[in-house]
Image: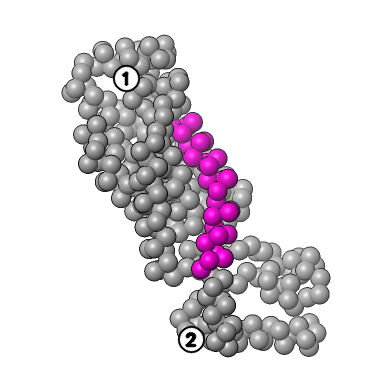
Amino acid sequence: MRAGAFKVWMEETEAERKGSALGISRQRPLCQTAQRVFFFPEQAKKYFIFWREPHMSSTLSSTKKITYSAMFAAIAIVVMFFEFPLPFCPPFLKVDLSGAVSLLAAFMFGPVSAVLITMVKDIVHAFSSSTGCVGELGDFFMTSAFCVTASLLYRRHHTKKGAILGMACGTLAMTIVGCFTNKYMLIPFFANVMPIEAILSACSSVNPLIGSVDTYILFGAVPFNLVKGTILSLITLLLYKRLSSFIRENTIGKRVDKVSKAS
């Protein structure tokens, strides 16, 4: 390490110390220090095995997390009003994209924020529920299982492959939970409103493989949740990087500028 590079490193360390005194916490990726210390950034990366950005939840203050979580909850409430059925699934199973909002929040702010966002949007929609709040309760369980599983795996493997693995496992978790919520919550509710034979007849008109409750679960609920999880995962893949970069630039970047001016 040359003297000039060492001086730059000392100045950055002093700026971080002053930032801590002001109550501002910033976790700088190792690659940034490496690129300032060594003359060849590509060579510097070889010395840092864990070369990656820190998780956003570790760089945002609790106030910022609450603010952004509230914004995400409001967006999820609006998005949940727009839903559409799948051509091969029972007509009362509809896809809404609010789960993608919860999953984005899970990746950026952690699983607790995602569960709270999901709870808020389902409570709001419960006031206008056509399923006696059973559909909203089932959605809460399924979306929470999806987001918590995906975010925990992504936090453990903070890479693009880790995100894909997390969303795949989250889709499976949502599908498994969906089997139980459909069999023990949704179907019993509709059975109190109309005969179970009429429900199965309506399902078989769309999907001839459905003839009983068990075949409804196997050929109706399972493929529906697998397709739904895939759609939500693709939307998250398209939006996550851009949205997280925008939040970083408009929160962490501004705080660093304040520290630089103060120093």
User: Where are the magenta residues, as a range?
Assistant: 225-251
Instruction: Please name the residue shown 58% across and 54% down the image.
Output: 242
Q: Is residue 202 left or right of residue 101?
A: left
- The percent coordinates of residue 40 (x first, y second) are 81, 70
Nearest to the eye among marks 1 and 2: give it.
Answer: 2
Residue situated in front as seen by the camera: 71 or 201: 71
Which of marks 2 and 1 precedes in the sequence?
A: 2
Secondary structure at badge 2 equals helix
Q: Using the image, determine if residue 58 lies above or below residue 221.
A: below
Figure quadrant of the N terminus: bottom right
Q: CA distance from mark 1 to mark 2?
A: 62 Å
Q: Using the image, determine if residue 23 lies above or below residue 244.
A: below
- The answer to which quarter of the image holds residue 219 is top left
Q: Is residue 157 left or right of residue 39?
A: left
Residue denoted by label 2: 21
Residue 229 visible to an observer of this rendering: yes
- The answer to which quarter of the image holds residue 183 is top left
Q: Main secondary structure of the magenta part?
A: helix
Residue 257 numbered tag: none
- Residue 241, magenta (yes or no): yes
Instruction: Please name the residue shown 24% across and 38% down the image.
Output: 128
- Residue 186, magenta (yes or no): no
Q: Kindly identify the amino acid type of the residue bearing the numbered disc 2.
A: Ala
- The percent coordinates of residue 3 (x first, y second) are 78, 88
Residue denoted by label 1: 213
Q: Kindly identify the amino acid type of the residue bearing the numbered disc 1.
A: Val
Q: Is residue 70 left or right of residue 14?
A: left
